[in-house]
Amino acid sequence: MLQFLLTLIQILGLKGETNKKIIYMEDLEKRKQVYGICGECNEPGTGRKWCQPCNVKRFKDNFKNWTSGNKDIDEFIQQSQIDAVHYKKFLEWIPFENFKDITYITRGGFGKIFSAIWSEGCILSWDIENQKWERGINIKKVVLKSLDNSSCISTEFLNEIKSHLRIYLWNVIQCYGITQDPNSKDYMMVLRYCENGNLRNYYLNNELNCYSKIKNLKDIASGLLNIHNAGKIHKDFHSGNILFTSFPYISDLGMCQPTNNENQLAKKEGIYGVLPYMAPEVLRGYQYTKASDIYSFGIMMNEYLSEEIPYNNISHNHTLAIKICKGLRPNIFKYTPKNKYHSQMDEYDDKIKLNESDKKRSNNIQTHSQAIYTSRLLNFKDLPEPVNSDVLQSTLLSECFDCQLDESDLNEINQD
Ligand SMILES: *[C@@H]1O[C@H](CO)[C@@H](O)[C@H](O)[C@H]1NC(C)=O
Ligand SMILES: *[C@@H]1O[C@H](CO)[C@@H](O)[C@H](O)[C@H]1NC(C)=O
Ligand SMILES: *[C@@H]1O[C@H](CO)[C@@H](O)[C@H](O)[C@H]1NC(C)=O
Ligand SMILES: *[C@@H]1O[C@H](CO)[C@@H](O)[C@H](O)[C@H]1NC(C)=O
Ligand SMILES: *[C@@H]1O[C@H](CO)[C@@H](O)[C@H](O)[C@H]1NC(C)=O
Protein backbone atom coordinates (compact mmCIF):
# COMPACT_ATOMS: atom_id res chain seq x y z
CA MET A 1 0.00 0.00 0.00
CA LEU A 2 2.82 2.32 0.84
CA GLN A 3 4.10 2.12 -2.69
CA PHE A 4 0.64 2.61 -4.13
CA LEU A 5 0.18 5.75 -2.10
CA LEU A 6 3.62 7.11 -2.79
CA THR A 7 2.98 6.70 -6.48
CA LEU A 8 -0.32 8.52 -6.24
CA ILE A 9 1.30 11.23 -4.20
CA GLN A 10 3.82 11.68 -6.95
CA ILE A 11 1.37 11.65 -9.81
CA LEU A 12 -0.83 14.21 -8.15
CA GLY A 13 1.96 16.09 -6.47
CA LEU A 14 3.87 16.61 -9.65
CA LYS A 15 0.77 17.48 -11.61
CA GLY A 16 -0.08 20.40 -9.36
CA GLU A 17 3.22 22.09 -8.92
CA THR A 18 3.97 22.40 -12.58
CA ASN A 19 0.42 23.13 -13.53
CA LYS A 20 0.40 26.10 -11.24
CA LYS A 21 3.35 27.51 -13.09
CA ILE A 22 2.49 26.52 -16.62
CA ILE A 23 -1.27 26.31 -16.86
CA TYR A 24 -3.14 27.99 -14.06
CA MET A 25 -3.28 31.75 -14.30
CA GLU A 26 -4.48 34.03 -11.53
CA ASP A 27 -4.98 36.90 -13.93
CA LEU A 28 -8.65 36.91 -14.96
CA GLU A 29 -8.05 38.88 -18.14
CA LYS A 30 -5.38 36.42 -19.26
CA ARG A 31 -7.58 33.47 -18.44
CA LYS A 32 -10.36 35.02 -20.46
CA GLN A 33 -8.03 35.35 -23.45
CA VAL A 34 -6.65 31.84 -23.18
CA TYR A 35 -9.63 29.78 -22.00
CA GLY A 36 -12.59 31.95 -22.92
CA ILE A 37 -15.78 32.47 -20.93
CA CYS A 38 -17.70 29.69 -19.19
CA GLY A 39 -21.04 29.21 -20.96
CA GLU A 40 -22.80 28.77 -17.62
CA CYS A 41 -21.44 31.32 -15.18
CA ASN A 42 -19.93 33.76 -17.70
CA GLU A 43 -16.67 33.91 -15.77
CA PRO A 44 -13.29 33.18 -17.37
CA GLY A 45 -12.44 29.46 -17.52
CA THR A 46 -9.76 28.03 -15.23
CA GLY A 47 -8.31 25.60 -17.79
CA ARG A 48 -8.91 24.41 -21.32
CA LYS A 49 -12.70 23.95 -21.64
CA TRP A 50 -12.81 23.88 -17.83
CA CYS A 51 -14.59 26.04 -15.26
CA GLN A 52 -13.60 24.97 -11.78
CA PRO A 53 -16.51 26.52 -9.79
CA CYS A 54 -19.15 25.07 -12.13
CA ASN A 55 -17.54 21.64 -12.36
CA VAL A 56 -16.98 21.39 -8.62
CA LYS A 57 -20.76 21.66 -8.10
CA ARG A 58 -21.30 18.76 -10.48
CA PHE A 59 -18.61 16.64 -8.88
CA LYS A 60 -20.05 17.33 -5.42
CA ASP A 61 -23.58 16.44 -6.51
CA ASN A 62 -22.19 13.13 -7.65
CA PHE A 63 -20.17 12.31 -4.50
CA LYS A 64 -23.05 10.32 -3.04
CA ASN A 65 -23.30 8.29 -6.25
CA TRP A 66 -20.02 6.46 -5.94
CA THR A 67 -17.74 5.00 -3.32
CA SER A 68 -14.47 3.13 -3.38
CA GLY A 69 -15.46 1.34 -0.20
CA ASN A 70 -12.62 3.08 1.58
CA LYS A 71 -13.24 6.41 3.30
CA ASP A 72 -9.69 7.68 2.80
CA ILE A 73 -9.62 6.91 -0.90
CA ASP A 74 -13.07 8.50 -1.30
CA GLU A 75 -11.90 11.68 0.36
CA PHE A 76 -8.73 11.64 -1.65
CA ILE A 77 -10.55 11.45 -4.97
CA GLN A 78 -13.15 13.97 -3.86
CA GLN A 79 -10.49 16.47 -2.88
CA SER A 80 -8.77 16.05 -6.25
CA GLN A 81 -12.08 16.85 -7.97
CA ILE A 82 -12.68 19.90 -5.80
CA ASP A 83 -9.21 21.25 -6.49
CA ALA A 84 -9.14 20.59 -10.24
CA VAL A 85 -8.65 23.67 -12.40
CA HIS A 86 -8.04 21.54 -15.48
CA TYR A 87 -9.25 18.22 -16.87
CA LYS A 88 -5.97 16.47 -16.16
CA LYS A 89 -5.96 17.47 -12.55
CA PHE A 90 -8.32 15.07 -10.86
CA LEU A 91 -8.97 11.39 -10.40
CA GLU A 92 -12.18 9.43 -10.84
CA TRP A 93 -13.38 6.36 -8.99
CA ILE A 94 -13.82 3.87 -11.82
CA PRO A 95 -15.78 0.69 -10.99
CA PHE A 96 -13.89 -2.42 -12.09
CA GLU A 97 -16.84 -3.63 -14.19
CA ASN A 98 -16.34 -0.61 -16.47
CA PHE A 99 -13.20 -2.28 -17.84
CA LYS A 100 -13.23 -4.93 -20.53
CA ASP A 101 -10.59 -7.21 -22.05
CA ILE A 102 -8.42 -7.11 -18.97
CA THR A 103 -5.14 -8.66 -20.02
CA TYR A 104 -2.13 -9.37 -17.85
CA ILE A 105 0.95 -7.72 -19.34
CA THR A 106 3.76 -8.11 -16.88
CA ARG A 107 5.08 -7.77 -13.36
CA GLY A 108 6.74 -4.49 -12.62
CA GLY A 109 9.13 -3.91 -9.79
CA PHE A 110 6.31 -3.45 -7.30
CA GLY A 111 3.19 -5.01 -8.69
CA LYS A 112 1.22 -6.32 -11.62
CA ILE A 113 0.37 -4.50 -14.81
CA PHE A 114 -2.69 -5.17 -16.96
CA SER A 115 -4.09 -3.56 -20.06
CA ALA A 116 -7.82 -2.97 -20.35
CA ILE A 117 -10.41 -1.25 -22.46
CA TRP A 118 -12.17 1.64 -20.77
CA SER A 119 -14.79 2.50 -23.38
CA GLU A 120 -16.21 5.40 -21.36
CA GLY A 121 -12.92 7.31 -21.55
CA CYS A 122 -11.75 10.10 -19.27
CA ILE A 123 -13.66 13.31 -18.61
CA LEU A 124 -12.52 16.20 -20.81
CA SER A 125 -15.16 18.88 -20.25
CA TRP A 126 -18.81 19.57 -19.47
CA ASP A 127 -21.16 19.46 -22.45
CA ILE A 128 -23.60 22.27 -21.62
CA GLU A 129 -26.00 21.53 -24.44
CA ASN A 130 -26.48 17.88 -23.54
CA GLN A 131 -25.85 18.38 -19.82
CA LYS A 132 -23.31 15.59 -19.54
CA TRP A 133 -19.58 15.07 -19.31
CA GLU A 134 -17.78 14.99 -22.60
CA ARG A 135 -15.31 12.11 -22.49
CA GLY A 136 -12.15 11.37 -24.44
CA ILE A 137 -13.18 8.28 -26.32
CA ASN A 138 -10.15 8.31 -28.62
CA ILE A 139 -7.96 6.82 -25.95
CA LYS A 140 -9.81 3.71 -24.84
CA LYS A 141 -6.95 1.49 -23.88
CA VAL A 142 -5.59 1.97 -20.39
CA VAL A 143 -3.14 0.33 -18.04
CA LEU A 144 -4.28 -1.01 -14.68
CA LYS A 145 -1.43 -1.10 -12.27
CA SER A 146 -1.73 -2.81 -8.94
CA LEU A 147 0.91 -2.55 -6.31
CA ASP A 148 1.68 -5.45 -4.03
CA ASN A 149 -0.29 -5.41 -0.81
CA SER A 150 -2.36 -2.38 -1.72
CA SER A 151 -5.60 -3.68 -0.26
CA CYS A 152 -5.22 -1.97 3.10
CA ILE A 153 -4.54 1.69 3.42
CA SER A 154 -2.89 4.14 5.77
CA THR A 155 -4.40 7.51 6.56
CA GLU A 156 -1.10 9.32 6.97
CA PHE A 157 -0.12 8.61 3.45
CA LEU A 158 -3.44 9.77 2.11
CA ASN A 159 -3.06 12.97 4.09
CA GLU A 160 0.26 13.48 2.46
CA ILE A 161 -1.30 12.89 -0.94
CA LYS A 162 -3.91 15.53 -0.22
CA SER A 163 -1.26 18.12 0.41
CA HIS A 164 0.12 17.40 -3.06
CA LEU A 165 -3.18 17.59 -4.80
CA ARG A 166 -2.71 20.67 -6.90
CA ILE A 167 -0.77 19.41 -9.90
CA TYR A 168 0.12 18.70 -13.59
CA LEU A 169 3.29 17.69 -15.34
CA TRP A 170 4.18 17.32 -19.01
CA ASN A 171 6.21 14.33 -20.14
CA VAL A 172 4.99 12.34 -17.16
CA ILE A 173 2.33 9.68 -17.54
CA GLN A 174 -1.29 10.61 -16.76
CA CYS A 175 -3.32 8.85 -14.11
CA TYR A 176 -7.08 8.86 -14.79
CA GLY A 177 -8.29 7.36 -11.57
CA ILE A 178 -8.43 4.46 -9.18
CA THR A 179 -10.24 1.13 -9.32
CA GLN A 180 -10.30 -2.05 -7.25
CA ASP A 181 -10.01 -5.63 -8.37
CA PRO A 182 -13.01 -7.29 -6.65
CA ASN A 183 -11.17 -10.62 -6.36
CA SER A 184 -7.77 -9.66 -5.02
CA LYS A 185 -9.18 -6.48 -3.40
CA ASP A 186 -6.06 -4.69 -4.65
CA TYR A 187 -6.50 -1.04 -5.50
CA MET A 188 -5.21 -0.21 -8.96
CA MET A 189 -4.14 2.96 -10.68
CA VAL A 190 -5.71 3.60 -14.06
CA LEU A 191 -3.00 5.05 -16.28
CA ARG A 192 -2.54 6.05 -19.85
CA TYR A 193 -1.61 3.10 -22.06
CA CYS A 194 1.51 3.66 -24.14
CA GLU A 195 1.17 1.57 -27.26
CA ASN A 196 4.86 1.65 -28.14
CA GLY A 197 5.99 0.14 -24.88
CA ASN A 198 9.08 1.27 -23.05
CA LEU A 199 12.16 2.93 -24.47
CA ARG A 200 13.86 -0.39 -25.09
CA ASN A 201 10.88 -1.86 -26.97
CA TYR A 202 10.70 1.40 -28.90
CA TYR A 203 14.23 1.42 -30.29
CA LEU A 204 14.33 -2.32 -30.85
CA ASN A 205 11.09 -2.28 -32.84
CA ASN A 206 11.54 0.94 -34.80
CA GLU A 207 14.10 2.35 -37.18
CA LEU A 208 14.84 5.67 -35.54
CA ASN A 209 16.94 8.47 -36.89
CA CYS A 210 19.14 10.58 -34.77
CA TYR A 211 16.93 13.65 -34.98
CA SER A 212 13.97 11.88 -33.48
CA LYS A 213 16.16 10.36 -30.78
CA ILE A 214 17.56 13.73 -29.76
CA LYS A 215 14.04 15.15 -29.80
CA ASN A 216 12.85 12.32 -27.54
CA LEU A 217 15.83 12.80 -25.23
CA LYS A 218 14.92 16.47 -24.95
CA ASP A 219 11.39 15.55 -23.90
CA ILE A 220 12.67 13.04 -21.38
CA ALA A 221 15.16 15.59 -20.04
CA SER A 222 12.30 18.05 -19.76
CA GLY A 223 10.24 15.55 -17.76
CA LEU A 224 13.13 14.86 -15.42
CA LEU A 225 13.79 18.57 -15.03
CA ASN A 226 10.14 19.10 -14.13
CA ILE A 227 10.47 16.47 -11.45
CA HIS A 228 13.64 18.11 -10.14
CA ASN A 229 12.14 21.58 -10.33
CA ALA A 230 9.26 20.32 -8.23
CA GLY A 231 11.89 19.50 -5.60
CA LYS A 232 11.73 15.76 -6.20
CA ILE A 233 14.09 12.98 -7.21
CA HIS A 234 12.82 10.09 -9.32
CA LYS A 235 15.16 7.47 -7.80
CA ASP A 236 14.25 4.66 -10.17
CA PHE A 237 15.02 6.11 -13.57
CA HIS A 238 15.78 3.51 -16.25
CA SER A 239 14.82 2.59 -19.81
CA GLY A 240 11.92 0.43 -18.65
CA ASN A 241 10.32 3.45 -16.99
CA ILE A 242 10.26 5.62 -20.10
CA LEU A 243 7.07 4.80 -22.00
CA PHE A 244 6.22 5.76 -25.57
CA THR A 245 3.13 6.75 -27.49
CA SER A 246 4.58 8.90 -30.24
CA PHE A 247 6.12 10.84 -27.38
CA PRO A 248 8.05 9.64 -24.38
CA TYR A 249 6.62 9.81 -20.87
CA ILE A 250 8.36 9.21 -17.58
CA SER A 251 6.46 6.66 -15.50
CA ASP A 252 6.78 4.77 -12.22
CA LEU A 253 6.89 7.61 -9.81
CA GLY A 254 6.51 5.37 -6.81
CA MET A 255 10.04 5.86 -5.56
CA CYS A 256 10.06 9.50 -6.42
CA GLN A 257 10.49 11.56 -3.26
CA PRO A 258 11.29 15.01 -2.03
CA THR A 259 14.96 15.93 -2.35
CA ASN A 260 15.70 15.94 1.35
CA ASN A 261 13.45 13.16 2.46
CA GLU A 262 15.65 10.34 3.66
CA ASN A 263 14.37 7.00 2.62
CA GLN A 264 14.34 5.04 5.86
CA LEU A 265 13.12 1.93 4.11
CA ALA A 266 16.12 1.99 1.80
CA LYS A 267 18.51 2.54 4.67
CA LYS A 268 17.33 -0.50 6.54
CA GLU A 269 16.68 -3.00 3.84
CA GLY A 270 18.69 -1.98 0.83
CA ILE A 271 17.90 0.00 -2.26
CA TYR A 272 15.47 -0.53 -5.11
CA GLY A 273 16.50 -0.19 -8.69
CA VAL A 274 17.92 -1.64 -11.88
CA LEU A 275 21.63 -2.10 -11.31
CA PRO A 276 23.10 -0.77 -14.60
CA TYR A 277 21.30 2.57 -14.15
CA MET A 278 22.19 3.08 -10.51
CA ALA A 279 24.91 5.56 -9.63
CA PRO A 280 27.87 4.06 -7.73
CA GLU A 281 27.29 6.26 -4.68
CA VAL A 282 23.69 4.98 -4.49
CA LEU A 283 24.93 1.39 -4.70
CA ARG A 284 27.17 2.18 -1.74
CA GLY A 285 24.13 3.31 0.24
CA TYR A 286 24.46 7.08 0.00
CA GLN A 287 21.38 9.19 -0.61
CA TYR A 288 19.83 9.59 -3.98
CA THR A 289 20.40 13.05 -5.40
CA LYS A 290 19.44 14.91 -8.55
CA ALA A 291 22.93 13.95 -9.71
CA SER A 292 22.22 10.25 -9.28
CA ASP A 293 19.04 10.67 -11.39
CA ILE A 294 21.18 12.35 -14.03
CA TYR A 295 23.67 9.49 -13.91
CA SER A 296 20.72 7.19 -14.69
CA PHE A 297 19.65 9.57 -17.46
CA GLY A 298 23.18 9.32 -18.90
CA ILE A 299 23.09 5.51 -18.96
CA MET A 300 19.63 5.61 -20.55
CA MET A 301 20.76 8.20 -23.11
CA ASN A 302 23.78 6.13 -24.08
CA GLU A 303 21.60 3.04 -24.42
CA TYR A 304 19.14 4.88 -26.65
CA LEU A 305 21.81 6.33 -28.92
CA SER A 306 23.93 3.19 -29.15
CA GLU A 307 21.03 0.73 -29.02
CA GLU A 308 23.11 -1.43 -26.73
CA ILE A 309 21.47 -2.62 -23.53
CA PRO A 310 23.90 -1.87 -20.71
CA TYR A 311 25.61 -4.96 -19.25
CA ASN A 312 23.16 -7.41 -20.80
CA ASN A 313 25.74 -10.16 -21.34
CA ILE A 314 26.78 -10.44 -17.69
CA SER A 315 25.14 -11.22 -14.39
CA HIS A 316 23.87 -8.21 -12.40
CA ASN A 317 25.55 -9.43 -9.25
CA HIS A 318 27.88 -8.23 -6.53
CA THR A 319 30.88 -8.48 -8.85
CA LEU A 320 29.28 -6.06 -11.31
CA ALA A 321 28.37 -3.66 -8.48
CA ILE A 322 32.01 -3.68 -7.40
CA LYS A 323 33.17 -3.05 -10.95
CA ILE A 324 30.75 -0.13 -11.33
CA CYS A 325 32.05 1.34 -8.07
CA LYS A 326 35.56 0.99 -9.44
CA GLY A 327 34.59 2.93 -12.56
CA LEU A 328 33.15 0.44 -15.05
CA ARG A 329 30.74 2.14 -17.46
CA PRO A 330 28.94 0.93 -20.59
CA ASN A 331 30.80 1.56 -23.84
CA ILE A 332 30.18 5.15 -24.77
CA PHE A 333 28.53 5.30 -28.16
CA LYS A 334 31.25 6.54 -30.46
CA TYR A 335 29.10 9.19 -32.14
CA THR A 336 27.72 10.70 -28.96
CA PRO A 337 28.10 14.47 -29.31
CA LYS A 338 30.21 15.58 -26.38
CA ASN A 339 29.20 19.21 -26.00
CA LYS A 340 26.73 21.24 -27.96
CA TYR A 341 23.90 19.04 -28.99
CA HIS A 342 22.20 21.22 -31.52
CA SER A 343 25.04 22.83 -33.41
CA GLN A 344 26.51 19.42 -34.08
CA MET A 345 23.32 17.67 -34.91
CA ASP A 346 23.60 17.77 -38.72
CA GLU A 347 27.15 16.55 -38.64
CA TYR A 348 26.19 13.92 -36.15
CA ASP A 349 23.34 12.62 -38.24
CA ASP A 350 25.53 12.43 -41.34
CA LYS A 351 28.17 10.45 -39.51
CA ILE A 352 25.59 7.96 -38.39
CA LYS A 353 24.12 7.60 -41.86
CA LEU A 354 27.65 7.07 -43.24
CA ASN A 355 28.13 3.88 -41.36
CA GLU A 356 24.92 2.15 -40.38
CA SER A 357 26.87 -1.05 -39.84
CA ASP A 358 28.41 0.49 -36.74
CA LYS A 359 25.04 0.50 -35.12
CA LYS A 360 24.74 -2.62 -33.06
CA ARG A 361 21.38 -4.14 -32.41
CA SER A 362 21.19 -5.36 -28.87
CA ASN A 363 18.58 -7.94 -29.74
CA ASN A 364 21.26 -9.91 -31.55
CA ILE A 365 23.08 -10.40 -28.28
CA GLN A 366 22.06 -13.23 -25.99
CA THR A 367 20.92 -11.65 -22.75
CA HIS A 368 22.46 -13.21 -19.65
CA SER A 369 19.88 -14.98 -17.50
CA GLN A 370 20.97 -12.95 -14.46
CA ALA A 371 20.81 -9.60 -16.26
CA ILE A 372 17.70 -8.15 -14.61
CA TYR A 373 15.94 -5.05 -15.89
CA THR A 374 13.03 -4.72 -13.46
CA SER A 375 13.45 -2.82 -10.22
CA ARG A 376 14.31 -5.02 -7.28
CA LEU A 377 15.74 -4.80 -3.83
CA LEU A 378 19.52 -4.67 -3.90
CA ASN A 379 21.72 -4.88 -0.88
CA PHE A 380 25.40 -4.95 -1.73
CA LYS A 381 27.88 -4.86 1.12
CA ASP A 382 31.52 -3.78 1.19
CA LEU A 383 31.57 -1.87 -2.06
CA PRO A 384 34.78 0.08 -2.74
CA GLU A 385 34.66 3.83 -2.01
CA PRO A 386 35.57 6.21 -4.80
CA VAL A 387 38.96 7.94 -4.60
CA ASN A 388 37.35 11.36 -4.65
CA SER A 389 34.30 10.64 -2.50
CA ASP A 390 34.63 13.87 -0.47
CA VAL A 391 34.43 15.90 -3.62
CA LEU A 392 31.39 13.97 -4.76
CA GLN A 393 29.56 14.46 -1.49
CA SER A 394 30.30 18.15 -1.23
CA THR A 395 29.46 19.07 -4.82
CA LEU A 396 26.50 16.73 -5.11
CA LEU A 397 27.86 15.33 -8.34
CA SER A 398 27.48 11.76 -9.34
CA GLU A 399 30.57 9.84 -10.33
CA CYS A 400 31.86 10.37 -13.82
CA PHE A 401 30.00 9.04 -16.77
CA ASP A 402 32.85 9.59 -19.22
CA CYS A 403 32.20 13.30 -19.31
CA GLN A 404 30.29 14.64 -16.31
CA LEU A 405 26.60 15.26 -16.90
CA ASP A 406 24.87 17.60 -14.51
CA GLU A 407 21.72 19.67 -14.12
CA SER A 408 22.97 22.32 -16.59
CA ASP A 409 23.49 19.62 -19.23
CA LEU A 410 19.96 18.43 -18.62
CA ASN A 411 18.81 21.99 -19.13
CA GLU A 412 20.83 22.25 -22.31
CA ILE A 413 19.44 19.00 -23.68
CA ASN A 414 15.98 20.28 -22.86
CA GLN A 415 16.45 23.66 -24.52
CA ASP A 416 15.94 24.46 -28.14
C1 LIG B 1 -26.87 10.44 -8.62
O1 LIG B 1 -27.79 9.41 -8.47
C2 LIG B 1 -29.12 9.83 -8.44
C3 LIG B 1 -30.01 8.66 -8.09
O2 LIG B 1 -29.44 7.46 -8.55
C4 LIG B 1 -29.48 10.45 -9.77
O3 LIG B 1 -30.81 10.90 -9.78
C5 LIG B 1 -28.56 11.62 -10.01
O4 LIG B 1 -28.80 12.16 -11.29
C6 LIG B 1 -27.13 11.20 -9.90
N1 LIG B 1 -26.33 12.39 -9.94
C7 LIG B 1 -25.45 12.60 -10.88
C8 LIG B 1 -24.73 13.91 -10.80
O5 LIG B 1 -25.21 11.80 -11.76
C1 LIG C 1 2.50 -8.67 1.36
O1 LIG C 1 2.59 -8.51 2.76
C2 LIG C 1 2.81 -9.74 3.43
C3 LIG C 1 2.76 -9.48 4.92
O2 LIG C 1 3.27 -8.21 5.23
C4 LIG C 1 4.14 -10.35 2.98
O3 LIG C 1 4.38 -11.57 3.64
C5 LIG C 1 4.09 -10.58 1.49
O4 LIG C 1 5.33 -11.06 1.03
C6 LIG C 1 3.74 -9.29 0.77
N1 LIG C 1 3.53 -9.59 -0.63
C7 LIG C 1 4.24 -9.00 -1.56
C8 LIG C 1 3.96 -9.50 -2.94
O5 LIG C 1 5.04 -8.11 -1.35
C1 LIG D 1 29.83 -7.98 -23.01
O1 LIG D 1 29.58 -7.02 -24.03
C2 LIG D 1 30.50 -5.94 -24.03
C3 LIG D 1 30.00 -4.91 -25.02
O2 LIG D 1 29.67 -5.49 -26.25
C4 LIG D 1 31.90 -6.45 -24.34
O3 LIG D 1 32.80 -5.39 -24.33
C5 LIG D 1 32.27 -7.50 -23.29
O4 LIG D 1 33.50 -8.07 -23.60
C6 LIG D 1 31.21 -8.58 -23.18
N1 LIG D 1 31.49 -9.43 -22.03
C7 LIG D 1 31.29 -10.73 -22.01
C8 LIG D 1 31.61 -11.44 -20.73
O5 LIG D 1 30.85 -11.31 -22.97
C1 LIG E 1 28.89 -12.61 -11.17
O1 LIG E 1 28.65 -13.05 -12.47
C2 LIG E 1 29.82 -13.27 -13.23
C3 LIG E 1 29.41 -13.69 -14.63
O2 LIG E 1 28.60 -12.73 -15.23
C4 LIG E 1 30.69 -14.33 -12.56
O3 LIG E 1 31.91 -14.45 -13.25
C5 LIG E 1 30.97 -13.89 -11.12
O4 LIG E 1 31.65 -14.91 -10.46
C6 LIG E 1 29.68 -13.62 -10.39
N1 LIG E 1 29.98 -13.09 -9.07
C7 LIG E 1 29.33 -13.47 -7.98
C8 LIG E 1 29.73 -12.80 -6.73
O5 LIG E 1 28.45 -14.32 -8.01
C1 LIG F 1 31.83 0.96 -41.22
O1 LIG F 1 32.13 0.19 -40.07
C2 LIG F 1 32.74 -1.06 -40.33
C3 LIG F 1 32.87 -1.83 -39.00
O2 LIG F 1 33.26 -0.99 -37.96
C4 LIG F 1 34.11 -0.81 -41.02
O3 LIG F 1 34.73 -2.04 -41.32
C5 LIG F 1 33.87 0.00 -42.28
O4 LIG F 1 35.12 0.34 -42.86
C6 LIG F 1 33.11 1.29 -41.99
N1 LIG F 1 32.75 1.98 -43.22
C7 LIG F 1 32.86 3.30 -43.37
C8 LIG F 1 32.38 3.84 -44.70
O5 LIG F 1 33.32 4.02 -42.50
Image (cartoon, helix red, strand yellow):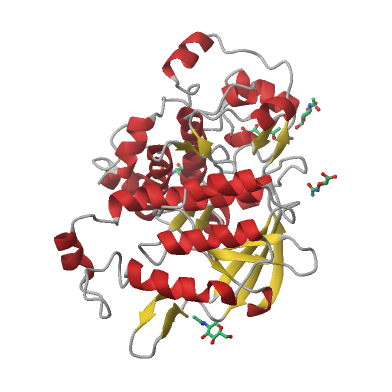
Residue in the image at 72% along x and 15% along y: 382
Rendered-image quarter of ligand 3: top right
Q: Is residue 314 left or right of residue 93?
A: right
Q: Is residue 88 left or right of residue 63?
A: left
Residue in the image at 42% along x and 54% along y: 171
Residue in the image at 69% along x and 73% along y: 102
Q: Is residue 98 left or right of residue 133?
A: right
Can residue 408 be seen at all in this image of the molecule?
A: yes
Q: Nearer the viewer, residue 164 or 227?
A: 164
Q: Quadrant of residue 92?
A: bottom right
x, y (%) of residue 82? Answer: 43, 62
Is residue 168 depicted above or below 297 in this figure?
A: below
Is residue 249 depicted above or below 179 in this figure?
A: above
Can residue 379 be seen at all in this image of the molecule?
A: no
x, y (%) of residue 246? Answer: 43, 64
Q: Quadrant of residue 142?
A: bottom right
Is residue 199 depicted above or below 412 in this figure?
A: below
Q: Quadrant of residue 29?
A: bottom left
x, y (%) of residue 232? Answer: 46, 37
Please count the marks in the image: 0
Q: Nearer the viewer, residue 105 or 1?
A: 1
